């Protein structure tokens, strides 16, 4: 029967330290299982090496598999033994083979799950930065660069396979959200739109398909902007949509009716998030709108996701008062707040009249410049 009830009943027993009123032995064991790092790492290493897929069907011997993967037979045997403990593989007389329970760990069965676990993808590599979470908790900053020597975006720019896997992840995560966001926002108010950090352009393409009179520009880093241009070409939108390779920390195309920031601000700390908003404010006309679409903290609670945003990027899904605190010194006011999909809220910002206090803070913020 899979999965087994306990991953390793011996280890929790070692950790018991006498009794405290109200504390049950089962709770201690449950906490130990939650804290166990051996199992999540074993799953990640197995998927990264492609073991579940390789051992489907009849399976194979440790010796054959170790030779094929060029890994230590001793290390592999220990890994497979633990994978057997948790029910992902089973041992026969001479071989290990993948169980039915372990089959979703094969890419062709569940590409989303395997992408998250594979340490060579952007998602899998980022997850391993959780080892440095204490740094993020102590400082409020990202921990990715502590592990990898540079921040996520620089790393992704230097390693095209990370960049491509991140973009593929972004497209896959939004398959069900895109139609909801297209339907949930009144895009017809805008003749021109700039999608700031628009990724591969799948959301923008869907918006344009639903609104044939609209034209748009998408700004993203070079490799991603090139892919977005292909999206527009393939979907016959190239006459209405242009992809611009550039940074949203530099001036944006001016005077559009709306500037879209979809899942952008949560990737950045307060200083950088405010600088992105400032670029939108600088480019906007007095009657333009800035459309922030994110999982707003007041409406959606994803505690593990928040920790991931912090550890990977130094960001978080902000609450409305936090977004307002970033926007107001720039002269941007929250106009409306609308849930536009299962997991996203549109916070619509408009340039507003500044109080003298706000104007002072706005000019101080803009003169600070960028620390990229
Ligand atoms: C979480 S993804 C969101 C993509 C898209 N808006 C969506 O919702 O699918 C963040 C995007 O910001 C882009 N990005 C990161 N740094 C950037 C920069 N300095 N200038 C422009 N785009 C940037 C990334 O390349 C990526 O496409």
Image (spheres, grey):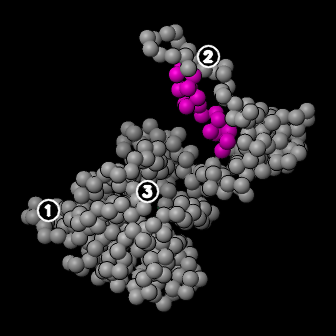
Q: Residue at x 23, y 66 (%)?
A: 335
Q: Quadrant of residue 358?
A: bottom left
Q: Is residue 40 magenta?
A: yes
Magenta stretch prevailing secondary structure = helix
State the residue lying farthest toward the bottom.
Answer: 239
Distance between the Cα atoms at labels 2 and 3? 40 Å
Single out the mark in the foreground, 2 or 3.
Answer: 3
The quadrant of the image that shows the C terminus is bottom left
Label 2: few (<14), some or many (≥20) within 10 Å? few
Q: Is residue 309 magenta?
A: no
Q: Quadrant of residue 109?
A: bottom right
Label 1: few (<14), some or many (≥20) within 10 Å? some
Single out the mark in the foreground, 1 or 2.
Answer: 2
Q: Are dots 2 and 3 in contact, CB under 8 Å? A: no
Instruction: Tell me which numbered mark, 2 or 3, is placed earlier along the sequence.
Output: 2
Return the mark for residue 13. 2
Question: In terms of secondary structure, where does tag 1 sit?
Answer: helix
> Residue at label 1?
358
Return the mark for residue 343. 3
Q: Is residue 267 above or below residue 16?
A: below
Question: In terms of secondary structure, where does tag 2 sit?
Answer: helix
Residue 50 as seen in the image, left or right of residue 200: right
Question: In terms of secondary structure, where does tag 3 sit?
Answer: loop
Instruction: Tell me which numbered mark, 1 or 2, is placed earlier along the sequence.
Output: 2
Q: In the image, which residues are magenta? A: 27-44
Q: Residue at x 82, y 48 (%)?
A: 56
Count of number-bearing discs: 3
Q: Are dots 1 and 3 in contact, CB under 8 Å? A: no
Distance between the Cα atoms at labels 1 and 3? 32 Å
Instruction: Tell me which numbered mark, 1 or 3, is placed earlier along the sequence.
Output: 3
Single out the mark in the foreground, 1 or 3.
Answer: 3
Q: Is residue 340 above or below residue 252?
A: above
């Amino acid at each position: 029967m899979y999965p087994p009830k306990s991953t390793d009943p011996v280890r929790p027993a070692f950790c018991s330290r006498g009794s405290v009123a109200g504390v049950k032995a089962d709770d201690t064991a449950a906490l130990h299982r939650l804290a166990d790092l051996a199992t999540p790492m074993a799953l990640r290493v197995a998927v990264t090496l492609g073991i579940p897929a390789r051992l489907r069907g009849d399976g194979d011997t440790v010796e054959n598999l170790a030779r094929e993967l060029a890994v230590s037979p001793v290390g592999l045997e220990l890994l497979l033994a633990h994978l057997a403990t948790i029910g992902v593989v089973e041992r026969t007389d001479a071989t290990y083979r993948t169980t039915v329970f372990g089959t979703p760990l094969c890419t062709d069965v569940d590409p989303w799950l395997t992408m998250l676990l594979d340490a060579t993808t952007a998602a899998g590599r980022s997850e391993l930065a959780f080892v440095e979470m204490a740094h993020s908790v102590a400082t409020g900053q990202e921990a990715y660069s502590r592990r990898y020597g540079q921040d996520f975006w620089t790393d992704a720019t230097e390693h095209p396979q990370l960049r491509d896997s991140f973009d593929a992840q972004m497209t896959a995560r939004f398959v069900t959200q895109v139609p909801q966001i297209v339907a949930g926002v009144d895009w017809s108010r805008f003749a021109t739109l700039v999608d700031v950090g628009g990724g591969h352009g799948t959301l923008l393409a869907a918006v344009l398909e639903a609104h044939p009179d609209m034209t748009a520009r998408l700004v993203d880093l070079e490799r991603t902007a090139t892919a977005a241009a292909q999206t527009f070409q393939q979907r016959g939108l190239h006459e209405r949509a242009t992809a611009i390779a550039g940074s949203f920390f530099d001036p944006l195309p001016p005077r559009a009716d709306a500037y879209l920031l979809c899942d952008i601000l949560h990737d950045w700390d307060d200083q950088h998030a405010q600088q992105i908003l400032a670029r939108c404010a600088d480019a906007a006309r007095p009657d333009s709108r800035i459309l922030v679409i994110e999982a707003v903290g007041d409406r959606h609670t994803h505690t593990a996701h928040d920790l991931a945003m912090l550890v990977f990027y130094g960001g978080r899904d902000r609450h409305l008062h936090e977004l307002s605190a970033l926007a107001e010194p720039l002269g941007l006011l929250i106009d409306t707040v609308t849930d536009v999909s299962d997991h996203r809220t549109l916070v619509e910002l408009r340039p507003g009249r500044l109080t003298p206090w706000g104007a002072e803070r706005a000019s101080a913020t803009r003169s600070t410049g960028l620390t990229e």
